[in-house]
């Protein structure tokens, strides 16, 4: 069964990217946000991304206009009744996701529709059991920025039907042109199980006074050929997201290396979240002016 109409819940950094890549592949895309200001901000984010792609000659003017025309924006969740695939990309909080999937279970009418989560850390089984159709629920985890990075983690739960997994893989690989890696349903999946302890170690190193943020990042960029240092990467991901992933992984495994350092907790409490609001381990406010 070919997927032609897609719904995306949430139009933040991740959701807007998912909406864009789907629209650029000529899919019918419905995008939801909980209020009009958030929806307007999401639309503006997509427009800026398409303008960048146009500037760098990744797409033509006609392709950019066509993609935008393929997206419908709504604050009414009931309009998702006809979707064949719904991808959730809301805040990384388990209760919020459970509540949303329970709603989608009642709204999405097709019994064959796939309900997918873009969660970066929460086990899919926990989300799936909020519905009456866990066999049609799985994780499709994209990476930021979605239009640029080719990877998708496909995460079936113990209850996910083989057909659901096959259709989701075909959609990500053949329709969106992504490279798919399959992960078991464990908090953090493949990438974050390796990445988060690395970032948390860099935060502990900074907090201890062992080295400056610049020296830590330069060490990994120039010494290990990483495109970004761990603290620069944390700022890009968002320190609140790093905290949420670390807490989900620590809850699952109880391993000290997954425990969020107090320094990270204080930064999030202070609203120092990284690039998304202008200041994290580095100050981006001048660049945003």
Image: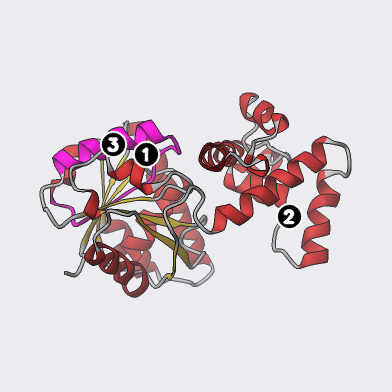
Q: Which residue is depicted at the point 72% across and 31% down?
A: 263
Is 136 one of the magenta-colored residues? no
Image side of residue 152 versus residue 232, left or right? left
**Which residue is tagged 3?**
100
Above/below status of 49 relative to 178: above
Task: Measure the C-alpha gap from mark 1 to mark 2.
Answer: 33 Å
Q: Which residue is mark 2?
A: 229
Mark 3 → mark 2, Cα distance in angstroms: 35 Å
Residue 281 pos. (x, y %): 73, 39
Camera-near label (1 vs 2) is 2
Sequence-wise first label, 1 or 3: 1
Residue 99 among magenta residues: yes
Magenta part of the protein: which range?
A: 82-107
SS for tag 2? Answer: loop
| Residue hosting label 1 | 40
Q: Nearer the viewer, residue 264 or 274?
A: 264
In the rendered image, residue 17, in percent from the top left (x then y), is placed at: 43, 54
Query: Residue at left 57%, top 39%?
Result: 250
Task: Please tell me which residue lies in front, 158 or 183.
Answer: 158
Taking the image as drawn, is residue 192 in sight? yes
């Amino acid at each position: 069964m070919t997927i032609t109409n897609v719904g995306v819940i949430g139009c933040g950094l991740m959701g807007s990217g998912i909406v864009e890549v789907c629209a650029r592949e000529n899919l019918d895309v419905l995008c939801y946000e909980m209020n009009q200001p958030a929806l307007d901000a999401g639309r503006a984010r997509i427009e800026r991304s398409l303008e960048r792609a146009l500037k760098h000659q990744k797409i033509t003017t006609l392709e950019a206009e066509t993609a935008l025309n393929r997206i419908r924006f709504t604050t009414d969740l009931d309009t998702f009744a006809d979707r064949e695939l719904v991808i959730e990309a809301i805040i990384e909080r388990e209760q919020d996701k459970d509540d949303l999937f329970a709603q989608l279970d009642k709204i999405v009418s097709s019994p064959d529709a796939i309900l997918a989560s873009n969660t970066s850390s929460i086990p899919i089984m926990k989300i799936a059991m909020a519905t009456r159709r866990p066999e049609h629920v799985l994780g499709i985890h994209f990476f930021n920025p979605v239009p640029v990075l080719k990877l998708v983690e496909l995460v079936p739960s113990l209850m996910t039907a083989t057909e659901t997994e096959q259709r989701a893989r075909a959609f990500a690989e053949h329709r969106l042109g992504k490279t798919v890696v399959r992960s078991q349903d464990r908090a953090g999946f493949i990438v974050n199980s390796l990445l988060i302890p690395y970032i948390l170690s860099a935060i502990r190193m900074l907090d201890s006074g062992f080295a400056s943020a610049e020296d830590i990042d330069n060490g990994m960029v120039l010494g290990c050929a990483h495109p970004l240092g761990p603290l620069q990467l944390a700022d890009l991901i968002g320190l609140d997201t790093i905290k949420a992933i670390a807490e989900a992984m620590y809850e699952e495994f109880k391993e000290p290396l997954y425990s969020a350092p107090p320094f990270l907790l204080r930064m999030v409490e202070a609203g120092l979240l990284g690039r998304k609001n202008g200041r994290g381990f580095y100050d981006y406010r001048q660049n945003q002016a």
